[in-house]
Every structure is written in C-alpha cells, then in structure tokens.
Image (tube, grey):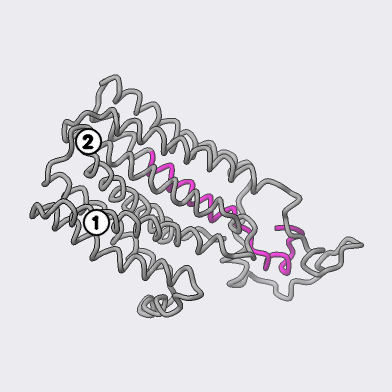
C-alpha cells in the first residue's frame, strides 16, 4: 500500500494523544510520584487533546473529497472507520469535562468517573483505528489481531514517554513513570517483533494459484490489460525492497525501543534527566512514525495478483 503522510501523522499523533491522556488519568488517580498539580494536569490533558485533534484533522487530507468526511459517521454498525469517528467525537466532551473537573476541583467521584470514561473511550478509539486495517481480509499483513494490539501498544508507549517528560519537568519522583514506560515500551517491542516474524511466513501468502483456484499447475498472468500505471497499481501496488525493509525494521527497534530504553536508564540514574526524557519522547515518536510508514509499505493487496504479482 502507498504510505500516505496524512494517515501516518494521524495514527502516530492521535495514538500518542490517546495514550497520554489515559495514562495521565492513572497518574492522577494514584498520585504517582507525588502527583501533578492541577495546572500541570490540565496542560497535559490539553496537549493530549491537541495531538488527537490535529491527528484526526490530518486524516481528512487523505480523502479525495474532504468535505464528505462526515459520511464516515453513518455506518457505525458495519464499519470500524465509522466506529472510530463516533468514539472519537464522544471522547472529546468527556475529556473536556474531566479537565474542567480537575481545574475547578470537583468532587473526587465526579472527577474519577469522567476520567475513567475518558480513558476507556481513548482505548476503544485506538482499538477501532487498528481494526480498520485488521478487518481487511484482502491484505494478509493486516488481517491479524496483532495489528490493533500493536496500535494500542505503540500509542501507549508514546504516551508514557510524553508523560515521563512531563513528570521530569514537574520535578516529581520519576521512578513510577520510568517503570510504567519501561513496561509498555517492552510490550510494544515484543508485539512488534512477533508481528514482523508473522508476516514473513510464506505459507500464509496468497498466490495467483489460490486467487484463480487453479492449484494443480503453475499459473502466470500473460497480459495485465494496461501498459501504464493505474490507480490500483499506484495505490495498492507500492513495493519496498527487502533490504530496505530490513534496514527500516532495525531503525524501528533502535529508534523506537532501544534508544528510549537507554534514556530511561539515564533518567533513573539522574544523568541529564530533562535532556534524556526529551530524547526518549521524540525518539519513541519518531520510531513509531517509521514503523507506521513500514506498516503501510509492506502491505500487499491481493489485487496485485491480477496485475502481474505471483504472490502477496
């Protein structure tokens, strides 16, 4: 699939925003590291919502006719894209009410109720984003539960690193935030490794034989029916060299997981805490962006089988 920058920015930014506000609620509820002040919680929540809003807006740039984006809300019963949009819209007022409760020091039960609902809606929305791709049986690399699991893990990993950065600047005890980030980043790394191993399994790959049902002989397409590129070949026929894909996977693990892990150690040992936290957060988000580009670039739609490809 052709990697669209708008969709990459949308999934990375909104995932980090949803992860940040969910973990911010946990930090607020359990008063982690001594607890953020009221002003710091509100600022953190607004940053998270800013990431979400800009991410959602960027997703419309991928549409041929952005003014029809509202139609995505009309198929809630059958479309994960519609569910994502509806959940995101419901999330916004709940998150704002939660931040208002913090700012005006509302009763604890009210504050925690709206915080819990905000965190749950954030989780459901990110899950729905992953399911947009996981439900597509025509793309083997996406049609797996590992896709929503990776979307959740990477979103919350980015959010945890941003929350750690906030804890460092707020002067809190960073130990619980380091532990949280280390756990989520480790889970994200393991899930990503499993996903990369799974999509390499050749036995699961659709071929021109399985597409035509002719399994007893070698089938080869003699004529694609066109001499120039088409929308299908340009949008669904994007190819990346195996060597380049391997290099980018190494970049994902070094930039997105290893470097943030090293920075967590530095923060724990109090060596350049703020600088290390900044590097960890930006490296994690950059690694997630590379991972998302590769996620789209490696996807092979079965329509390629009818345009000369022997397998997908």
Q: Compare residues 29 and 284 and report the one nearer the observer.
A: 29
Q: Quadrant of residue 11?
A: bottom left
Assign a secondary structure to mark 1.
helix
Q: Is residue 275 visible?
A: yes
Residue 277: x and y, percent? 28, 32
Whether 288 is drawn above or below 2: the answer is above
Res 305 label:
none
Give the distance between the C-alpha atoms of the residues marked 1 and 2, in whole angstroms. 24 Å
Front one among 52 and 224: 52
Asked if residue 248 shows in the view, the reply is no
- The residue that label 2 is drawn on is 167
Q: Magenta stretch: residue 283 in it?
A: no
Which residue lies at the image location 85% right of the left edge and 64% below the top edge? 219
Q: Which residues are magenta?
A: 284-312
Q: Residue at x 44, y 50 (%)?
A: 152
140 in relation to 246, above or below? below
Which labelled disc corresponds to residue 113? 1
Which SS class for mark 2? helix
Classify mark 1: residues with Cα within 10 Å, few (<14), some (14-19) or many (20+): few
How many numbered marks does the figure carry?
Answer: 2
Along the horizontal axis of the image, is 151 left or right of 238?
left
Q: Tell me the quarter of the picture where residue 1 sits.
A: bottom right
- Tell whether 5 sits left or right of 110: right
Query: Residue 131: image x %, image y %?
Result: 51, 61
Viewed as shown, does residue 33 lie left or right of 226? Answer: left
């Amino acid at each position: 699939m052709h990697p669209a920058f708008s969709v990459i920015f949308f999934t990375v930014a909104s995932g980090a925003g949803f992860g940040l506000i969910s973990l911010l609620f946990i930090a607020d509820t359990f008063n982690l590291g001594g607890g953020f002040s009221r002003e710091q919680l509100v600022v953190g929540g607004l940053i998270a919502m800013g990431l979400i809003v800009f991410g959602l807006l960027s997703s419309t740039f991928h549409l041929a006719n952005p003014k029809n984006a509202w139609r995505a809300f009309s198929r809630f019963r059958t479309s994960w894209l519609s569910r994502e949009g509806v959940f995101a819209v419901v999330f916004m007022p709940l998150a704002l009410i939660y931040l208002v409760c913090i700012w005006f020091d509302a009763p604890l039960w009210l504050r925690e109720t709206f915080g819990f609902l905000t965190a749950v809606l954030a989780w459901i929305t990110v899950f729905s984003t992953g399911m947009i791709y996981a439900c597509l049986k025509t793309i083997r690399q996406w049609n797996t539960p590992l896709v929503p699991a990776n979307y959740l893990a990477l979103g919350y990993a980015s959010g945890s690193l941003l929350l750690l950065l906030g804890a460092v600047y707020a002067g809190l005890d960073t130990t619980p935030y380091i532990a949280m980030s280390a756990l989520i980043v480790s889970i994200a790394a393991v899930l990503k490794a499993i996903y990369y191993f799974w999509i390499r399994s050749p036995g699961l790959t659709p071929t021109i034989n399985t597409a035509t049902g002719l399994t007893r002989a070698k089938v080869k397409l003699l004529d694609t029916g066109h001499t120039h590129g088409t929308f299908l070949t340009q949008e669904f026929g994007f190819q990346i060299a195996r060597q380049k894909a391997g290099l980018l996977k190494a970049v994902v693990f070094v930039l997105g997981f290893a470097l943030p892990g090293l920075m967590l150690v530095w923060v724990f040992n109090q060596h350049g805490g703020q600088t290390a936290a900044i590097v960890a957060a930006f490296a994690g988000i950059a690694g997630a962006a590379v991972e998302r580009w590769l996620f789209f670039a490696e996807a092979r739609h079965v329509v390629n089988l009818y345009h000369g490809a022997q397998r997908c």
